[in-house]
Amino acid sequence: MASHLVLIPSYNTGPKLIATVREARIYWDDVWVVIDGSTDGSEVEVEQLAANDPGLRVLIQPRNAGKGAAIFAGLMAAQASGFTHVLTMDADGQHPAAAIREFMAISQRNPHAVILGLPVFDDSAPRLRVVGRRVSNWWANLETLWLGIHDSLCGFRVYPIADLLAVMKQTRWMRRFDFDPEAAVRLCWRGLRPINHPAPIRYFRPDEGGVSHFNYLRDNCLLAGMHSRLLFGALLRLPYLIWLLVKSFRR
């Protein structure tokens, strides 16, 4: 039985969703899409595609609850179906489907690690977004004593399902835009080794079908609150984090 699954959360992604799904299916047999309460009808074509494709499954969430909540629903269903790992990727075409097999292979060789995408940006990347993520990266590394999170915000990752579900069940957070950085930090706290691997990232303009739901004020406030919570949590775990750091040097 297959152990690894591609999981794609989607909210009002438009035509990019079907293009992303088709490309992911080229590179992997099991691809699931979680429709997070979309209202743009973007799920219709994917459901039609899934009707004739046994490797594609579509899960429909009745209301928009956030990226992390969509991934949580997908994780629960994937675990119930016997999968042990998921590769998460965005539905808007930013993430490289061609890298799926490479990331999956790394995970299969390192099943107890979390495989983190390390973005390689081209000229399409908004300068403000690129600079802003450096702030989140610095805080994430402070909260883990620099255990190895090279990028805290990239959503192209492979997670062990059981570990990710365990940390998500312990908190009411990690359900919206705060999912990616908090998942990386909490999995490091859990003792999982982060493995960083390059992934080319492309931002599409609106006239190219690009869709972004990022809100600079709302989501940056969410990230600021998240890092405040995680810093406090890191202080409580400081002796354990020091032990993990020493252990990593001994490998």
Image (cartoon, helix red, strand yellow):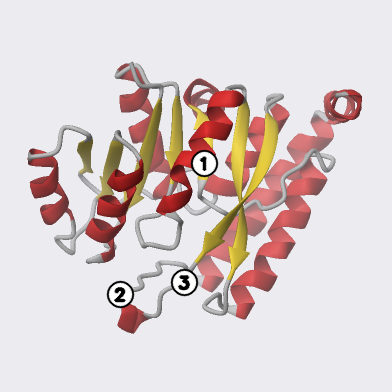
- Earlier in the chain: of badge 1 and badge 2, it is 1
- Amino acid type, residue under disc 1 in the picture: Glu
- Earlier in the chain: of badge 3 and badge 2, it is 3
Q: Is residue 206 visible?
A: yes
Q: Residues within 10 Å of mark 1 (few under 14, many from 20)?
A: few
Circle count: 3
Q: Is residue 162 above or below residue 36?
A: above
Q: Give the number of the mark in front: 3 or 1.
A: 1
174 left or right of 131 in image: left
Please state the horizontal and vertical placement of residue 200, each as a whole percent of the image.
Answer: 55, 61
Q: Secondary structure at mark 1?
A: helix
Alpha-carbon span between mark 1 and mark 2: 27 Å
Please state the horizontal and vertical placement of residue 103, each as a whole percent of the image.
Answer: 53, 40
Q: Is residue 160 above or below residue 224?
A: above
Question: To which residue does mark 1 refer?
Answer: 102
State the residue at coordinates (30%, 47%). 26
Alpha-carbon span between mark 3 and mark 1: 22 Å
State the residue at coordinates (61%, 33%). 114
Q: Residues within 10 Å of mark 3 (few under 14, many from 20)?
A: some
43 left or right of 173 in image: left
**The disc label shown at residue 209, or none:** 2
Question: To which residue does mark 3 refer?
Answer: 203
Q: In the picture, residue 133 is in which quadrant? A: bottom right
Q: Is residue 54 above or below residue 232?
A: above
104 left or right of 197 in image: left
State the residue at coordinates (40%, 67%). 213
Q: Residues within 10 Å of mark 2 (few under 14, many from 20)?
A: some
In the rendered image, which quarter contains the C terminus? top right
